[in-house]
Image (cartoon, rainbow, N blue to C red):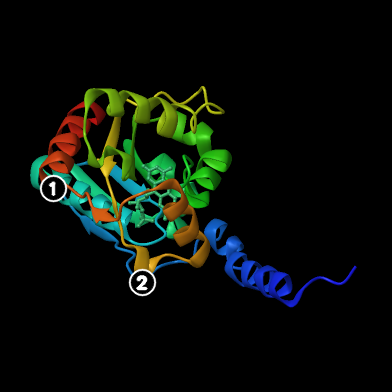
Amino acid sequence: MKKPFSVLCLMLALVVLLLPATGYCYREKPDAVIEDSCAGGAKKILVTYDTKHGATAIVAKKIFDTLCDNASDNATIDLIFVENLDADTIQDYDAIIIGSPIYIGKWLRGINKLLKRNHASIAQIPSAFFVTCTYIGEDTPERQEYAKETYVGKNLKDYPDITPVDIGILGGQFTFNELYPIEFFLMKLAGFEEGDFIDDAKIETWAKGAAEQLL
Ligand SMILES: Cc1cc2nc3c(=O)[nH]c(=O)nc-3n(C[C@H](O)[C@H](O)[C@H](O)COP(=O)(O)O)c2cc1C
């Protein structure tokens, strides 16, 4: 039976919409990647992160700045985008902070790859994890608990050798106009509200607490 023209048009529109679906999984290196280093004491801390739209780079930089302001007397701190990290150097660090944004409950591929290949060396040193997400835009103890379990606990379940000394559930950001069509579609469907939930004071408080436990 012949399909009516309108059905074909609808199917074509869906294909066009969903074609960049791989774009949802595919993490391109954004222009917003930030890397830095501050030299101080003998201990070395690595802050590494992945990002798709840049928010986690901003949060990671604020964590890095807080560490440099508060811990650089006894530590040297490197901020490295996970894609540029030479995993062989992990063993040179005394502590590591790892961060990912949350996409449908999951970490980005760069962080999953890092853990899959290097969990043994990461497990040798104290580690802290942070995620950026929008769920915590409304920051309540219940949401913190849920996010720790769902966004960090579940993503770490394959790595029982890694026990983070601290977990940061931090606000991220997104606007609809920067999303791929499939992301736009998914976020609208899920009823997410766009917004900037990056909170400098919360990041600073978390980073100071994490640094105390890591060093
Ligand atoms: C397709 C999509 C799925 C998302 N899924 C979640 C989610 O499950 N939970 C959540 O709290 N935030 C979710 N977010 C919000 C992102 O985690 C948040 O915007 C993050 O800061 C983006 O980081 P990035 O700019 O570094 O990629 C999602 C965003 C997009 C675009």
Count the marks: how many? 2
Write the residue at 31% across / 62% down.
Answer: 175
Q: Residue beneath label 2, please?
A: 31
Q: Is residue 209 above or below residue 6?
A: above
Nearer to us in this view, 135 or 114:
135
Q: Quadrant of residue 138?
A: top left
Looking at the picture, how far across and down is residue 117, in whole percent? Answer: 57, 42
In the rendered view of the protein, which quadrant contains the C terminus? top left
Mark 2: few/some/many CA within 10 Å (<14, 14-19, 20+): few
| Amino acid type, mark 2 | Asp
From this viewpoint, which residue is outermost toward the right?
1
**Residue at point 32%, 36% (across, down):** 95
Q: Residue under circle 1?
A: 200
Look at the picture and state if 70 lies above or below 196.
Answer: above
Q: Secondary structure at mark 1?
A: helix
How packed mark 1 is, by other alpha carbons closer than 10 Å (few <14, some 14-19, many 20 or more), is some
Q: Amino acid at mark 1?
A: Asp
In-front residue for pair 42/153: 153
Q: Is mark 1 within 8 Å of ligand 1?
A: no
- Drawn side of residue 184 relative to residue 77, left or right: right
Whole-angstrom CA distance, mark 2 to mark 1, is 22 Å
Q: Residue at x 45, y 35 (%)?
A: 122
